[in-house]
Image: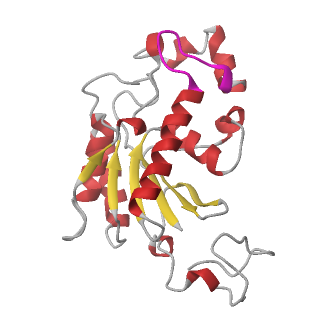
Amino acid sequence: MTTLLLARHGLTHLTGPVLAGWTPDVHLSEAGQAQAEALATRLASLELDAIVSSPLERCQETAQAIAGRRDGRVAEVLTDDRFGECRYGEWTGRPLGELAKDPLWQVVQTHPSAVTFPGGESLPAVQHRAVSAVREWNERLGPEAVYLVCSHGDVIKAIVADAMGLHLDQFQRIAADPASLTAIRYTPLRPFVLRLNDLGGDVAGLRPPEGSEHEDGGENLTGSDAAVGGGAGTT
């Protein structure tokens, strides 16, 4: 039951008004640094088996803040380009207000599976590379691992849509705010989305307890079984 924590990077001076994409040298703003430190504080007590990041500066800085609070535990930040931002091509660096007037904008909103950004990447390709990376990291780290990936809003939403069995056309229904935490537990049968766009609260329950295969007391329950009726929770 590998547990994946998805953290979106903190705010930058471009976050919100401009589609930053792969614009170089986009760093965390002062507010973004504070968000990253707050997230690092929340996660400090949680044992992590790996910290992986998009190569872009805003994610690297967020991941480094988290790694810096590990108290001697795993502190190295590993980089995986497959968790990098969507390559928005000609849309990169343009104001969102301007892009909203482009006919492609409505396709992005209602039929994202059909979108290939001009001179850039398709959204299905983004989802494929990101989900493939998750599967490979799950296999590499093993079924007992809890690890963190610091990535970008559309990438996180695409991973969550896959975990929830949603068509990519539904991924705009998912939110991933700056410095938010999303948690997905992968079992042999299905993934479970434990938290989504979480901006506060205790994280102790994100590591499964010992003997969690039968935590509800049922002889035939496995970690892949959904608790009928909702169950008693994991904390």
What residue do we see at 67% from left, 20% from top?
A: 114
Residue 29 rendering spot, x and y as whole percentages: 29, 37
Query: Is 167 on the left or on the right of 29, as rendered?
Result: right
Any magenta on residue 104? no
Residue 104 rendering spot, x and y as whole percentages: 63, 12
In the rendered image, the quadrant that contains the C terminus is: bottom right
Query: Is 103 on the left or on the right of 77, as rendered?
Result: right
Pick the residue in front: 88 or 30: 88
What residue do we see at 64% from left, 44% from top?
A: 161
Residue 94 rendering spot, x and y as whole percentages: 44, 14
Number of on-image labels = 0
Q: Does residue 79 sit above or below 219 in this rendering?
A: above
Residue 139 quadrant: bottom left
Q: Does residue 204 sit above or below 7 in this rendering?
A: below
- Secondary structure predominantly adopted by residues drawn in magenta: loop
What residue do we see at 27% from left, 49% from top?
A: 78
Any magenta on residue 117? yes
In the rendered image, the quadrant that contains the N terminus is: bottom right
Residue 200 rendering spot, x and y as whole percentages: 48, 62
The magenta span reads 113-123
Pick the residue in front: 194 or 4: 4
